[in-house]
Image (spheres, coloured by chain):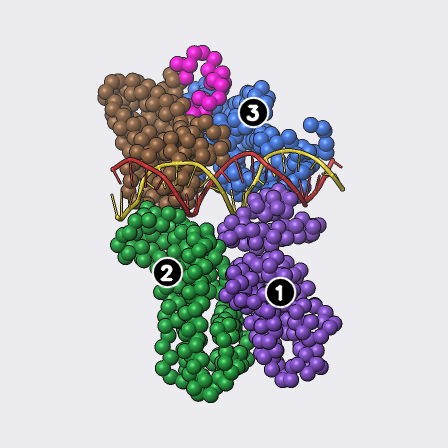
Chain colours: A purple, B green, C brown, D blue, E red, F yellow
Amino acid sequence: MKVKTMSKREDILEAVISLSDRCKTPGEMTISAVAEHAGVGKGTVYEYFTSKEEMMAEAVAHFIRTRLNTLIEMPFTGSFRQGFDQLSKKVDEIYRKNHSFFRLVFLTGEHEEYVATFSAKKAASQREEMFQKVVGMLFRLTEIGKAEGIITGNPGGKDMMFAFLCIASALCCVVPQSKELWDDKPNSTAIDFFYEKFVKLLN
Amino acid sequence: MKVKTMSKREDILEAVISLSDRCKTPGEMTISAVAEHAGVGKGTVYEYFTSKEEMMAEAVAHFIRTRLNTLIEMPFTGSFRQGFDQLSKKVDEIYRKNHSFFRLVFLTGEHEEYVATFSAKKAASQREEMFQKVVGMLFRLTEIGKAEGIITGNPGGKDMMFAFLCIASALCCVVPQSKELWDDKPNSTAIDFFYEKFVKLLN
Amino acid sequence: MKVKTMSKREDILEAVISLSDRCKTPGEMTISAVAEHAGVGKGTVYEYFTSKEEMMAEAVAHFIRTRLNTLIEMPFTGSFRQGFDQLSKKVDEIYRKNHSFFRLVFLTGEHEEYVATFSAKKAASQREEMFQKVVGMLFRLTEIGKAEGIITGNPGGKDMMFAFLCIASALCCVVPQSKELWDDKPNSTAIDFFYEKFVKLLN
Amino acid sequence: MKVKTMSKREDILEAVISLSDRCKTPGEMTISAVAEHAGVGKGTVYEYFTSKEEMMAEAVAHFIRTRLNTLIEMPFTGSFRQGFDQLSKKVDEIYRKNHSFFRLVFLTGEHEEYVATFSAKKAASQREEMFQKVVGMLFRLTEIGKAEGIITGNPGGKDMMFAFLCIASALCCVVPQSKELWDDKPNSTAIDFFYEKFVKLLN
DNA sequence: CATGAATGAGCCTTCATTCAT
DNA sequence: GATGAATGAAGGCTCATTCAT
C-alpha cells in the first residue's frame, strides 16, 4: 500500500475502535458501518487495508499505540496510593470507553487470532515489547511504594505483572456486571479492596 | 417452547459448544454447521429455539450447568495443595477444551449480551447462584488450608472469589499466549507461582 | 449436491442460455438476472451450483445436450439438397436463437475455458463424442448424396467435418453482419452458394 | 476528444490487446490493469477515451489497422503453395498471439457490439474496406495460382473470401482444440489438408 | 496534461429463517 | 415432530469513473 495522508487511515481505525463497543458481536462491525462512522466511502477502506481482517489487525495495533501508551507512560508524581488510584482509574476509564476492544487487546488472547493472520511475528514482538513497557511502568510505581515503606519485599517483573493483571481482570469483571456481587458498600470500597490485594501481591 | 424429548435439544447445545472451539470467529458458527454436527435437520433447530440468539443463550446456560458444575462440585479429598492443583488443572482443562466458550461465560461479561437479550432476570439470578456455588467450593478448599495451617487468616467470600478469579484469569492469559513471558523455567513452575499468589491472597 | 427435482435446475440453465443473447459481454450475465429470469430466488441458484463458474459450465453442457442433439439426430428423409437445406436452416436457427451461446459452444474453443475450470476431462470426452456424432449425421446425409450421384467421391470423416465447419462458420459470419457483403442478390442465393461449396468440398 | 500526442493513446490500445490474451474473461481486463500495463495513470485513460467501452472499440480498430494490415499487404514472391503457406502461417501466428482479440475481430461479429455502441457507420465502412483489401490480397495470390496452372477456374471475390474464411475458421478451430481430432498424422499434414481444400474451393 | 485518491453502484456469495411436505 | 428446499437481506469486495491537485 502506498503512503497516503494518514488522516483517513486513522479515521477508519478510530471508527473501528469506536464501533466495537456499539456492537455485541464482531460480526456486527461491517465495513459499511465503519466507513460511515469514519466519514469515508466504503471503497476508501480498501484503499488503506486489503481486507477487513487486516483492518482489524491494524486497529488493534493502533489501539495499543494510542490507548495503552497513555497507560504505560503514566507519570507517578504523588504517593503510592495515589499512583495506584491513577492506574486503576486509567484502566477503568480505558475499559469503560473501549471495553470490547480492551478485552480484545489486553485481557484475552483473541486479538492474536486477528493479528496472527496478518503478521504473527509482528504480534509476538509487539506483545513482548508491551510486556516490558508495562513492567517498567509498574516498576516506577513500586519504587514509590518502597520509598514509602509500603512495599517491603522485592517483587520481580512477573510479580508486578501478575498483580497488575489481577487488578485489571477484576476491574473488567466488575465493570460489566452488576456491582452487587462485589460490593454491598459504595463503589469506592472496591478500589480499597483491590488496593489491599495489590499491596499484598507485591509483598 | 413446547416440552420435547430433551435429547435433540441437548445434542444441539453440545454441538454449539463443540463448534465454538473450531471456529475462530463467532460468525463461523452457522445454524447449518450446528444442525449437521448435532445430526439433525436445519429446521429442527427452530423447533427448539426461536432464533440463533436464543440458542446461543441457552448454550451458555447449558455450558454452565454441565461444565462448571464439575468445577463447583469438585471433591477435595487430599491436601490443600493437591486441591489447588486439582482446581487449577480443571480450570485449565475446561479452558483448553472450550476456551472460546469459557471466555464467553466466565471471564468476560460477554455472555450477558447474549443472555440479556433473552432473559436478563434469568441471567442475573443464574450468576448470583453461580457465585454462591463457586464460593462454596472455595470455602471447602479453604477449610482444608486452615486445617493444615496454610491459611491462617479468615478470608471472606469476596477474598476467595478474587483469589480464584486472579488464578483463573492468569491461567487464561498464559495458556493462549506463548509461555515465555511467564516462564523461563519449565511449565510446572507456573503452577507454583500461582499457588504462592493464591495462598497470599487468601491470607 | 443432493438430487433435487430438476425443474428448477433446468429453469436456471435455460435462463443462462436465454440471457447470453441479451448480454453483450459475459460480465453482464449476473446471478441476479439469471435468478430473476428463471423465476427463482438468488439464493436458490446456489442450491444447484456451487458458483457462477460451475453454473456456466453446466449451462454449456445443457446446451449441447438439448440444442445440438436436435442437430445431430436430424432425420434426412428427402433429397440430398433438401437435407442440406434442413441442416443449414437448423444451424442458422440455432445460431439466430442462441448466437452468443452457439459461438461459445460450437465455433470457438472458448467454452473450454469455462468448462476446463470445472472438469477438463469431461470437456475433452464430450467434444470427442460430439465430433463422432456430427460425423455420423453427415455420413447419413452423404450417403443420400452418393445415391443421388451428387457425391461421387468418398469423403472421410475429416472431409465431412471440414465441409460442415466451413458452412457453419460462413453462416455464422453472414448472419450477424449486414448481408450486403455476401449478397447482392436475395438471401436464398447465399444458400445456393454454400450448397455449391459444400458439394465441392465433399468431392 | 482533443488531439494529443498519440504515443500514450497507442500505449493504451496496445496494452488492451496485450492484456486480452492474458485474461480468460473480459471481466479481468480492468482499467487499472490497462493503465498499469501502458505505464500511465488510471485517470489518463479517460483523457483519451470517454469510457471503457469506447476504449475497447478503439482497440479493435487499432488491432485491425496494425495486425491485419500485415496480412493484407503480404507480398507473395514465391509459388502459389508458398503463398498459401505464408498466409496460413500469418493467420496462425496472429491467432496464436492474439487469439482472444482475433476471435473478437475476425471470426465472430462480436466486435460489432463493441463498435456499434460507439460508431455503427464507421464500423460498417471499416468492414467493407477490410473486405476489399482482403479480396485484393487473395486476388494477388490467386493470380499466381493461375499462372502456375493450379487455379484453372475464375473465382470471384466471394469465392476467394469464402475459401479464405474456411481456412481461417478451420485454423482457429484446430489451434485451441487438441489436434487429435483433425490429425492422426503429424501436424504438417493439416496444412496439406487445408491446402487441398483451398485449391478445391477456388476452382 | 497527468494523476491517483476517493467513491458508490453493484457483484458474488452466505446464511438465518420460513414453510410445505 | 422433523425436514431441507427456497429465499432475500446483507456482507465483503471490485472497479469504472470522477475530480482536486
Displayed quadrant of residue B22: bottom left
Q: Chain of mark 1?
A: A
What is the crowding at mark 2: few (fewer than 14 residues within 10 Å), some, or many (at least 20)?
Answer: some
Secondary structure under tag 3 reads helix
- Name the residue beneath numbered marker 2: B62
Give the amino acid type for the residue marked by disc 3 in the picture.
Thr
Residue D180, percent from left and from top: 36, 42
Give the amino acid type for the residue marked by disc 1 in the picture.
Val
Indicate the quadrant containing the N terminus of chain D: top left, top right, bottom left or bottom right.
Answer: top right
Give the amino acid type for the residue marked by disc 2 in the picture.
His
**Alpha carbon distance from label 1 to label 3:** 64 Å
Q: Name the outermost residue toward the front.
A: A185
Q: Residue at x 44, y 32 (%)?
A: C33
Vertical relation: D116 (above or below) B151: above
Q: Residue at x 65, y 61 (%)?
A: A67
- Name the residue beneath numbered marker 1: A91
The numbered dot on residue D91 is none
Residue D92, percent from left and from top: 49, 37
Callout 1 touching callout 2 (CB < 8 Å): no
